[in-house]
Image (spheres, coloured by chain):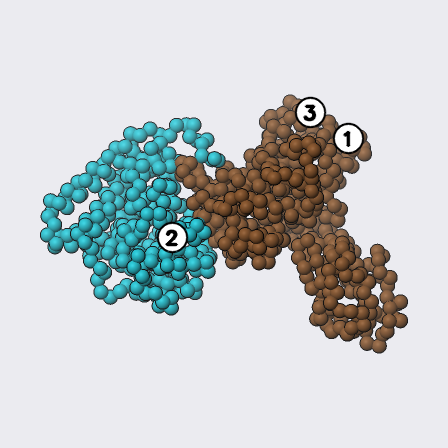
Chain colours: A cyan, B brown
Amino acid sequence: MAAPKKAAAGAAQDKTDGGSPPEFTREQELKALREMLLIRRFEEKAGQLYGMGAIGGFCHLYIGQEAVVVGMQMALKEGDQVITGYRDHGHMLATGMEANGVMAELTGRRGGYSKGKGGSMHMFSKEKHFYGGHGIVGAQVSLGTGLAFANHYRGNGNVSVTYFGDGAANQGQVYESFNMAELWKLPVIYVIENNRYAMGTAVSRASAQQDFSKRGVSFNIPGKQVDGMDVRAVKAAGEEAAAWCRAGKGPFILEMQTYRYRGHSMSDPAKYRTREEVEKIRHDQDPIEQVRNRLLAAKVSEADLKAIDAEVRDIVNASADFAQHDPEPDAAELWTDVYR
Amino acid sequence: MPIQVLMPALSPTMEKGNLAKWLKKEGETIKSGDVIAEIETDKATMEVEATDEGTLGKILIPEGTADVAVNTPIATILADGESAADLAKAPAPAAKSAESAPPAAAKAEAPAPKAAPAPQAVAEPDPEVPAGTEMVTQTIREALRDAMAEEMRRDADVFVMGEEVAEYQGAYKVTQGLLQEFGAKRVIDTPITEHGFAGVGVGAAMTGLKPIVEFMTFNFAMQAIDQIINSAAKTLYMSGGQMGCSIVFRGPNGAAARVAAQHSQDYSAWYSNIPGLKVVAPFSAADYKGLLKAAIRDPNPVIFLENEVLYGHTGEVPKLDDFIIPIGKARIVRSGSHVTIISWSNGMTYALKAADELAKDGIEAEVIDLRTLRPMDTETIVNSVKKTGRAVTVEEGWAQSGVGAEIAARIMENAFDYLDAPVARVSGKDVPMPYASNLEKLALPSAAEVVGAAKAVCYR
């Protein structure tokens, strides 16, 4: 791991570095494109299945924010943990969890990651070090700090990547956690996904301090604002933060400036922002288009890109098929997994 | 007239203490604020400051004296112009001194309802303890500490976190000595941040560590209850069995003494409502030890409800290398054939005392210490009620949706035909806990109420 670029704790709050982020190799660009496409197509399919009634309850789509989890995952190493809130499908796919298992959980089937007992907001994978999937806004921040506590306790060099939104950033336990994380120098990267709206409440209507990278100032936690629509910027910031944590310097805050194209959940009335606002960001900043355009400029053929798209679509279609045909959990499952 | 210095109370539940050391000698000048002596209880050591000026006239209680009752005169201070000869005017020390002491200090009322030591008259041998086992006498506080220390020696994944658990040695001295043995890595003082550190504990447990999270009292755990229920209790189910949480949340629960509504709530019913949690609330020192060890080893989240009033009580604890009491098993503490009294934790104090009283009137009560509230040992309750045909539940918590209500429902479901009378509940009164000593006593259950309820179901 490279040494952190901004090592001084006092230098804490950086704006996004002026210049462009470090270039990706072609291989990295292709990987990022594939991962982001997988999330987008998966979420589009989930939206469709929801509309068909195959998915029940709440369903929060990640479309627009793909660069955040994909870039962060590229900055991590095996053993690092990921934990997030309820908008979690993208995080799961990024950690390498199978589309089939995620989609089947959305449809409440036995092949789902939680055997159909968790649903959209509650999935876990020990194997992929994914610790959920939490439905209580902000709860994952204390839990993610606990994952970091365990890393520190065991001295295993792993980092906990704890995601939460601009809405959760106003919860009290976030600051209780910040305090303990810095006090005990726990290896946790707090990734604040600022998608500008907490449900329907714009950041400006909910947050006295709208620069989320400064939310750790009173705890001396360094923070950085990152262009969360540029997967390269995300990866670079993630590496910097991870190096900081692995060096035993404690937590690091990354504010990912991103945007959610879809509603908060499937029943969003979309009255709190204009269609034009969404369209403009989609047109100007789409994280997937950015990579695609760079690849095309680098003379990757349209056909090669289409092949990636086709491969991703096959995975997603297969998952939708699986998720609709896999049986529901056995009735006996009602009573299992309450205790062990 | 010489001024009397009285043995001070250092905490709401203190009844007596040791006079550890005199820091002033007879004849020495004393200014207000001077530390004159050190007082020691099983919970803490405190300095006694003079509030009056003058000369230390006579030391009435020599240093090293143990078990000095609160409000006992321990010394006299001579004011300016007074001499040793005036000491004779001071009220005689000893028992009656309270009557002649200044009114404020003389309020010789026992600190709330715990004047009498808990009856530990156990008629029935504990089936978990092999016959002939050597026993040691321990306070419940020591039994808890030993349970944690033994489990921490056994498993490096076990650690303790909470407010004041390390350097202060435990707000109620339960974690005394653990920091010295296990170090700051495994005995962790947290900031005052219950919601946050409960979540940190649960997160650590999700990775396989085995935290013991101490709440200074369960009243403060209401700040953390979201993490306890939504995260700790539900994750195993929500993850389809993939990810569970082996964690103990422990601390004093229920009424202490004179600490009023916000510090006196009994959460037995709250936690025992939640699938995914186990809830333990022991009474005897042996059970405290054996059940805490079981709780720490349990792969599930366990709510371990202690009682501050009981911390200083002593009991016989088996001297065994590995003494475990299984979670989920009630114990018949006293056999009887006329009525079953079911309680747990400090409720047992009233239950056992009532059983003694009832025996005088020829009513033989069978007393069941539930010990675990979830999973509840319905079988032991039902078998007893089948024998006696009558039941009384005793709890410090409120009656509505309480544990007593649950027990009554189970008896009705499983032993309806055996009942000779409706199940009676004795509980805390349906009010927030008042501060005033007399009102507090009224708000809590009493042995007399248990006796009354038992006689009522026996139609006596």
Q: Is residue B15 above or below residue B403?
A: below
Q: Position of residue A56 (x, y in %)?
A: 34, 37
Tell me, yes or no, if residue B347 can be seen here: no
Return the residue nearer the eye: B304 or B127: B127
Residue type highlighted by circle 2? Gly
Name the quadrant of the N terminus of chain B.
Answer: bottom right
The residue that label 3 is drawn on is B387
Residue type highlighted by circle 1? Ile
Front: mark 2 or 3: 2
Q: CA distance from mark 2 to mark 1?
A: 66 Å
Task: State if disc 1 and disc 2 touch (CB < 8 Å).
Answer: no
The residue drawn where x is 26% and y is 36% is A319
Query: Could you tell me which chain the residue with mark 3 belongs to?
Result: B
The earlier-in-sequence mark between 3 and 1 is 1
Query: Furthest-bottom residue in view?
Result: B81
Tell me, yes or no, if residue A92 can be seen here: yes
Q: Position of residue A156 (x, y in %)?
A: 40, 50
As drawn, is A202 to the left or to the right of B101?
left
Which label number is shown at residue A157? 2
Which label number is shown at residue B131? none
The residue that label 1 is drawn on is B363
User: Which SS class for mark 1?
Assistant: loop
Query: Could you tell me which chain the residue with mark 2 belongs to?
Result: A
Name the quadrant of the C terminus of chain B.
Answer: top right
The residue drawn where x is 86% and y is 63% is B91
Q: Residues within 10 Å of mark 2 (few under 14, many from 20)?
A: some
Q: Quadrant of residue B27?
A: bottom right
User: Which SS class for mark 3?
Assistant: helix
Q: Residues within 10 Å of mark 3 (few under 14, many from 20)?
A: some
Q: CA distance from mark 3 to mark 1?
A: 14 Å
